[in-house]
Image: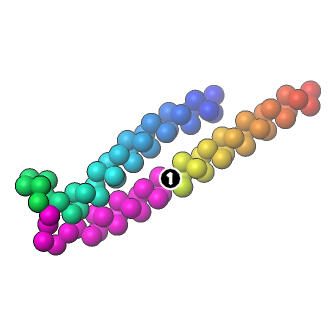
Amino acid sequence: MALQQHIFMDKYMMVVLGFLMIGIPIAFLSPTTGELREEPFFALFWASIGGIIAVVVYSGYKGKKARQQANRERRRKFKK
């Protein structure tokens, strides 16, 4: 059951990751004209980079916890 919830959470994280990755070029390009901005939005760029790092770290943390839980259940069944 815990593994299924982890997969469900990964879908949301992939959507968030997609939006963050789209934000990086928007920081440097104008969406209306497609040309480079004279002054890029560095706050948007760094927020996107920070968000991507946070999503990757959080996903790794959740995966580690799910593996630990699965190993714990496997050991419990083996001892009986």
Q: Is residue 15 left or right of residue 77?
A: left
Above-or-below relation of 15 to 76: below
Q: What is the residue that sits farthest to the bottom in this orientation?
A: 39
Asked whether 74 or 22 is in front, the reply is 22
The quarter of the picture where residue 12 lies is top left
What residue sits 34% from the left and 67% below the top? Answer: 46
Image vertical order of residue 35 relative to residue 78, above or below: below
Residue 42 magenta-highlighted: yes
Identify the residue at horizontal 54%, vertical 55% (top origin). Answer: 57
> Crowding at label 1, few (<14), some or many (≥20) Cα neighbours within 10 Å?
some
- Asked if residue 61 is among those painted magenta in the image, a careful observer would answer no
Label 1 SS: helix
Left/right placement of residue 55 relative to residue 21 reads right
- The picture places residue 77, in percent across and down from the top left corner, at 85, 28
In the current view of this chain or complex, which residue is farthest to the left?
Answer: 33
What segment is highlighted magenta in the picture? 36-55
Image position of 19 (left or right of 33):
right
The image position of residue 74, as x and y in percent, is 80, 32
Q: Looking at the figure, which quarter contains the C terminus?
A: top right
Q: Amino acid at mark 1?
A: Val
Residue visible at 11% across and 60% down in the picture: 35
| Image location (x, y in percent) of residue 44 | 28, 63
For image coordinates 58% across by 29% down, the residue present is: 4
Q: Nearer the viewer, residue 64 or 76?
A: 64
* Image quadrant in which the N terminus is located: top right
> Against 74, is 46 above or below?
below
- Colour convention of the picture: rainbow
Find disc 1 in the rendering and name its residue: 56
Q: Mainly helix, strand or loop, the magenta region?
A: helix
Q: Residue furthest front?
A: 35
